[in-house]
Amino acid sequence: MEKIYRERGVVSVIDVPEGLFVACEPQDFDEIAGNLIDNAFKWATRRVAVSSSTVSGTVSIAIEDDGSGLTAEQQTLVLQPGKRLDEATSGFGFGLSIASELAELYAGSLKVEKAGAGGLRVTTTLPVA
């Protein structure tokens, strides 16, 4: 994504241990992570951070940007299929809802909240492999 968004100067900070695996089909994980990371780069001002933690048989992967973020109401709306909050940007409004539905298929979840850097943090929780 750094190459795709190179002209905007967005950089990423990755803090995910090597060898961490989730109980999820690889193509489904790619769909979840791809949608979330692309969104983070799209809305970031300068920085996207990806981190993970493992607790009680689950892996939480947090993807955070330093963009303008969303209100609490908007955070709920963006999980609805086809709901776009900004018609001026590319996309169809299905990325977050698809990621959420895929996480739920694996007994996981997706949570949207304000990030520490002021932007958005999207945390996906999936069972550990």
Image (cartoon, grey):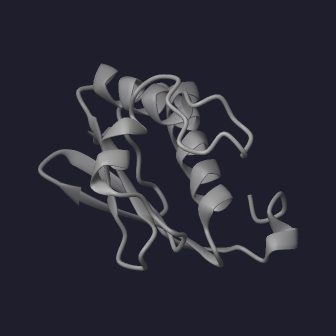
Is the N terminus in the top left, top right, bottom left or bottom right quadrant? bottom right
Residue 52 locus on image (x, y percent): 36, 62
- Seen at 84% across and 63% down, the residue is 3
Is the C terminus in the top left, top right, bottom left or bottom right quadrant? top left
Q: Is residue 121 above or below residue 6?
A: above
Left/right of residue 72 with respect to residue 3 in the rendered view: left
Res 54 visible: yes
Q: Quadrant of residue 114?
A: bottom left
Res 62 visible: no
Nearer to the camera, 96 or 57: 96
Q: Is residue 77 above or below residue 75?
A: above
- Seen at 59% across and 50% down, the residue is 39
Residue 13 locus on image (x, y percent): 57, 75
Check the image and name the residue furthest to the right: 7
- Seen at 55% across and 27% down, the residue is 94
Please tell me how many numbered marks the rendered image carries.
0
Residue 47 locus on image (x, y percent): 60, 76
Q: Quadrant of residue 77?
A: top left
Left/right of residue 80 with respect to residue 110 in the rendered view: right
Q: Quadrant of residue 110?
A: top left
Residue 75 locus on image (x, y percent): 35, 48
Q: Is residue 92 above or below residue 123?
A: above
Check the image and name the residue furthest to the left: 56
